[in-house]
Image: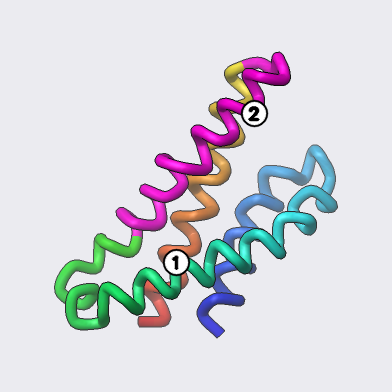
Amino acid sequence: MGVTAAALAAAAVLWAFARKRGWQRAATMLPPLLISSAMLGHNFARVGTETLGAKPWLYWMQSGGLAVAFIAPALWIGYVRRGLRKSVALNDGGEWLLAYLAMGTVFWLLS
C-alpha cells in the first residue's frame, strides 16, 4: 500500500509540472515510479522503524538524496548529450527532486 501511495504522490507532483506538456508524460512515469518507490520502501524497511522513529529526517534525506545523486545527474547527462538547454535539465531535475521528496513524505506519514 505504501509503495503504491508513494508512487501516486510522485506521479501527482510530476503531473502538476507536466500539465503544460501533457498528462501523458506523467502517466508514463508511473511504472518506473512504482519500482523507485518499492526500492525506497525496501530501504526504509532495512533502516528500521526504531531508527526512522528517532531520526525522521532520514525519510527526506534518503529520498531526496537519491534524486540529487542519481536522477538529476542522469537527466543532466542525457540532456547535455542531446544538446538541450541546461536550464531544462535543472528544471526537470528539480521536478524529480520534489517527486522523490513526496515519496519520502508518504512513507513518513504511513510510518
The residue indicated by pointer 2 is 78
Q: Residue at x 18, y 67 (%)?
A: 55
Identify which amino acid the numbered label 1 is placed on.
Leu
Q: Which residue is more in the foreground, 3 or 46?
A: 46
In the rendered structure, does residue 29 fall within the stretch colored magenta?
no
Q: Is residue 31 above or below residue 21?
A: below
Looking at this view, name the residue that lies furthest to the bottom: 1
The residue singled out by tag 1 in the image is 40
Helix, strand or loop status at disc 1: helix
Q: Is residue 15 left or right of residue 104?
A: right
Horizontal and vertical percent for residue 90? 54, 27
**Residue 55 circle label:** none
* Picture layout, residue 12 above or below residue 93: below
Q: Which residues are magenta?
A: 60-85
Residue located 81% across and 39% down the image: 21
Disc 2 versus disc 1: distance between alpha carbons? 24 Å
**Residue at 71% over, 55% down:** 29
98 vs 89, left or right, is: left
Q: Earlier in the sequence, mark 2 or mark 1?
A: 1
Q: Position of residue 50 (x, y in %)?
A: 19, 82
Give the quadrant of the C terminus.
Answer: bottom left
